[in-house]
Amino acid sequence: MKQQLIKYFFIAVLLGIGYFLSVYHIIILNRDFYLLKKPYLTFEYTFYNITNREPKDIMRVDMLREDGIGDLLVELGWLTEMEAAHLEEKYGYEIVEEE
């Protein structure tokens, strides 16, 4: 019985890790990590290293741009809000207004 409970515990832990990885982008900058929430469950761009990348190259990735990487770059001081808005517009970011 104890073996069965341990087995179920490890399966639950693995499922939890898988779920976490499918819900968040993990943005890596040197030794720091930042989380961006994904709009739906996917493993695309789960780990993305922005070390030594230009902001315009980062903003070209549709999924990251739509999930708010521009806000993170502004927060990190890599871009101003105006530059982020310009890059979002340039690479096809559509602002959806909620009612």
Image (cartoon, rainbow, N blue to C red):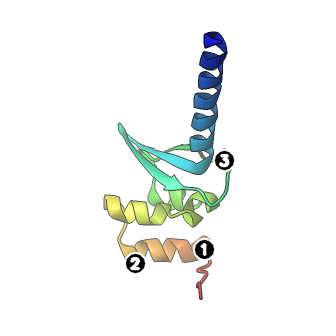
Number of residues whose C-alpha sits closer than 10 Å to that of mark 2, classed few (under 14), some (14–19) or many (20 or more): few
Instruction: Find residue 70 and name its label.
Output: none
Quote the CA–CA distance across marks 2 and 3. Answer: 28 Å
Pointer 2 or 3: first along the chain: 3
- x, y percentage for residue 39? 62, 61
Q: Amino acid at mark 2?
A: Met
Number of residues whose C-alpha sits closer than 10 Å to that of mark 1, classed few (under 14), some (14–19) or many (20 or more): some
Q: Which is in the foreground here, disc 3 or disc 1?
A: 3
Q: Secondary structure at mark 2?
A: helix
Q: Amino acid at mark 1?
A: Tyr
What residue do we see at 59% from left, 50% from top? 23
Q: Secondary structure at mark 1?
A: loop
Above or below, 65 relative to 51: below
What residue do we see at 45% from left, 55% from top? 54
Q: Which residue is mark 3?
A: 44
Q: Which is in the foreground here, disc 2 or disc 3?
A: 3
Pointer 3 or 1: first along the chain: 3
Pointer 1 or 2: first along the chain: 2
